[in-house]
Structures are given as C-alpha cells and as structure tokens.
Amino acid sequence: MSDLTNLTVAEIRDGVAAGTFSAREVATAFNAEVEVGRKLNAYIVETPEKALEAADVADAVRKSGDLKPLSGVPLGMKDLFCTEGVQSTAASHILEGFTPTYESTVSARLWDAGAGMLGKLNLDQFAMGSSNETSYFGNVVSPWRDASGKDLAPGGSSGGSSAAISARLCPAATGTDTGGSIRQPAAFTGISGIKPTYGRCSRWGIVAFASSLDQAGSMARTVKDNAILLEAMAGFDPKDATSLDAPVPQWEAGLSSDLKGKTVGIPKEYRPDGLNPEIEALWDKGIAWLKDAGAEVVEVSLPHTQYALPTYYIIAPAEASSNLARYDGVRYGLRDLPDGAGLQDMYAATRAAGFGDEVKRRIMIGTYVLSAGFYDAYYTQACKVRALIARDFEAAWEKCDLLLTPTAPSAAFALGEKQADPLAMYLNDVFTVPASLAGLPAMSVPGGLDSAGLPLGLQIIGKALDEQGVLNASLALEERAGFTARPEKWW
C-alpha cells in the first residue's frame, strides 16, 4: 500500500492487529520516506534496521495474539533521549560520537510497548532554541512553504520531530518541552503535541537542560495519537527523583469532546497590544468552538504573566550552567587537548570547540546569575516570581477547569530571520513559558492557516495531572477546526 505513511498511529496499530497490512510493510514505507526526506535534515541518525526488527517481532506475535499497545508503529526519537547502542548527541559537537550503553526510561517504555525506531531526530543544541538553527548538525527545514518560497523554521527545540511528522517521515515522535519546545514547533508545522504535568514522564536518560522544567511528551498528527503515545511513555520511575508516583490513566479510552459542565478561562494578559490579528481571530474561533462543545467561557487574570519570560530566562540558564558543567572532555564526548595543555586548558578548549554560540550564551547568563554577587538579585528573585506565577494559575482554577490561549505569537518565520536577535527569538515562548514554570500540562493543536497558508496553533492548559481534561478540550478543538492541510511535497 503506497499510502501507509499517511496513516495515524491508531490506524497503523489497528491495521496491523487486523492483518490489513503487515508491520514490515509499514516500516519499509516509512524507511523509504526518511531517505527521500533528507533535504529536511530532520534525522541526525537513521536506524531503518531497528524499525524493521520491531516490525518483524510485531508480525510474529500477531499470529499468537500477543500484540502490545504500539506493535507495528515506527517512531522518531528526539536525539535528547539516550538510546542504547545508537549515537545520542543532543545535537551538539561535544557529544558527537557518544553511544550510550543504556536506554532512557521513556524510550525503553516505548520499545517495551512494541514500537520501533526510525532514527534520532534533530533539535536545537541541548534543546536551547526556538527555530532548530542551533544544531551542530545543521538546521532542520520545515516542510511548509509560503508564497515567497523561503526555507521556514520548523520551531524548536523539537523541530526535527515536528518536521518529520508533518512531512510523513514518521507517524509520531517524542519531544521534550522546557519552555515550549513541543508546543511551539507543533503549532509551526500543523501537528499536535502535549507537554504533560512535570514528573509524569521520567527524565532519566534524557540529556538535561533545565532539570526543574524539562519534561518529555508526545508529538503526532492527532489528539488521539498523542493520548496513545503518552500512555506508553508515562509512569513512575524510581531512577528519577522528580518522577510522580501516580497511576497512569487510560487517556485514549477516556477521550471525549463533550465539554458540558466544563469552564474554560481566557487569560486577559495573553492579549497584549500589537497581538497578531490573525492569531487573535483564530483565538476567537477557538472560544466559539469550545462553547459549541458545551463549555462555559470566562475571562480570568494571570497578573504575573508579564514576568514569565524574564523569570524563565534566569532559571533555565542557571540550571543549564550547572547541568552542562559535566561536559569537560574527561569522561566522554569531545576532548580537545592542545599540545602542552594542562587540565584547565583542556576544559576550556573542549568547551570552546564543543558548545555552540547559543549554548555558550546561556551558560554565561546562568553562571552570572548564580555568582556570589548576583545570586539573590537574580536567581532567588526569579524563584520567588515563579512561585507567584504558579499561584496565579491556582487562583484561576477557582474559576475555571482549563485555559485557552494561542500557542505562538506568529506563524513560522524564515530561517535566519531572528537569528541575529536572541531577544526576538526568545519572544516565541511568550505563551508557552508560564505553564512550564508552573509544571502544568499543556497541548497545542492546529486551528487553521494564516493568510500566507501557514499553520497556526491553539493551546489548552490544564490543572496538574489533568491530562485527560487537556486532551478532551484539544479533541473538541480538533473536531471543530477540521484541520486537514498538509505541506505540498517539494523535498
């Protein structure tokens, strides 16, 4: 079947189970698309043999009736997840050639659920970026194009994941979200993506950026597919001290777009002066769609929203400067040892050669705000404001069950357009960062196209541990938006 790569995760799973097609046929079809799609630079490493191996296991067990939840489903794996025996780089030169001898908890759970791996997906280096232009292995190109024909950013940091799913180079993929790195790229490429509650998915075996913010999540073309994937990924892990010891609900079985009895809040602070009118118009449509699904809509206030970005860009770099100190050239990864150099010289040379400019910038900022003279003025103050932002959400939950906002302040921009201005790049996270600081589940779903024919996303934010509510409201939006647009194949 030539259209196997157009199938969703649910359709692949059910088709393999019914014997409509074999898992090997699916894996072979996607492996071929991965090869054809190399112009997008979505994959750092391709693992066609891994996809075929899992497919053959699925075809064998189908006869015995012992299929697993993801049997026959090949996936893309963001290259922030360590995969045993397969290079794992975080898209950085400093980890080029690093082959883990262990498997991250999340990827292990997906393989245990029967999934296969098509390859390791490109990203912003150490997940630091909003456009996938900071990768040592070259930027990912969005499969979408506007009338100008310029290469567009697929979003970041999970830009390899978003581009691959949108271009049908995989049916779904893992992502990680520290300040919007699942949701913003999903919005840019017309797919869905969910960041679960902080602690829902284990961080063990994921290369760390900011430990109090990093959270693994799923990316796919439909809300249902995300529910299926997240169910396999989530769960308590004793190897991760921040992992939540809570049962994993049956999110797929619980899906319902009936929002009767639910109240959705619209944060007034998310309508700043100068908000893109097309984003605002889509937001108004989203409000109407949720009302049509039975929800009551009310205005709420999140008064500390204006401080979310500066708070994030103090806390995240501070944690990054601590986490990235382990890359010193001594134990693994790159080692740059100039002739006659001592230990300190090796540290300096290795980091200078191994880290990209954006990573160095954030390490420098983080080291500065943690230094003795500035710790209280910056880091301590940011932690206090973070608590106020979380408290804003708690107050909002007294009036509503969920929040509806835009995902990003614009559609995808051209590669190189914002690279010279880090502050302009950081503003891409303005709608996604508050939920990250509060550790709340949030999801982006495609709502429509702008006047240039590019996707725009809507974001649902929920209470801690209420992924079901987030998925259900997202399903209501998905059904009413009827988004079926896809990029025209040029690669």
Image (cartoon, rainbow, N blue to C red):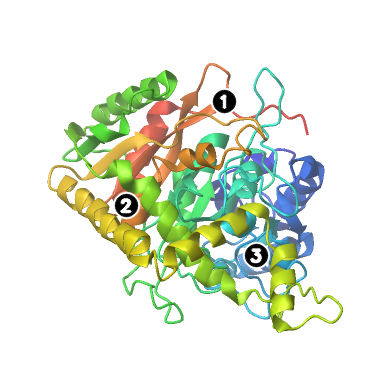
Image marks 3 and 2: residues in contact by CB distance under 8 Å: no
Q: How crowded is the residue under tag 2: few (<14 C-alpha within 10 Å), some, or many (20+)?
A: many
Question: Which one is earlier in the sequence, the residue at label 3 or at label 2?
Answer: 3
- Residue type highlighted by circle 2: Gln
Which residue is rendered at x = 27% and y = 40% of the image? 403
How many numbered marks, from 0 up? 3
Which residue is rendered at x = 66% and y = 53% of the image? 357
Q: In which quarter of the image is the C terminus?
A: top right
User: CA separation, marks 3 and 2?
Assistant: 29 Å
* Location of mark 3 (residue): 58
Q: How crowded is the residue under tag 3: few (<14 C-alpha within 10 Å), some, or many (20+)?
A: many
Which residue is rendered at x = 57% and y = 48% of the image? 129
Hey, which residue is sitting farthest right in the picture?
339
User: CA separation, marks 3 and 1?
Assistant: 37 Å
User: Is residue 112 among the parts visible in the rendering?
Assistant: no
Mark 3 or mark 2, which is nearer to you?
2
Q: Which element type, helix, strand or loop, lies under badge 1?
A: loop
User: Is residue 11 among the parts visible in the rendering?
Assistant: yes
Q: Which element type, helix, strand or loop, lies under badge 3?
A: helix
Horizontal side of residue 188 vs 369, given as left or right: right
Residue 365 at what x, y percent from top left?
Answer: 50, 58
Q: Which of 149 and 313 is in front in this view?
A: 313
Mark 3 or mark 1, which is nearer to you?
1
Question: Which one is earlier in the sequence, the residue at label 3 or at label 1?
Answer: 3
* Location of mark 2 (residue): 468
Q: Which element type, helix, strand or loop, lies under badge 2?
A: helix
Residue 184 at what x, y percent from top left?
Answer: 49, 41
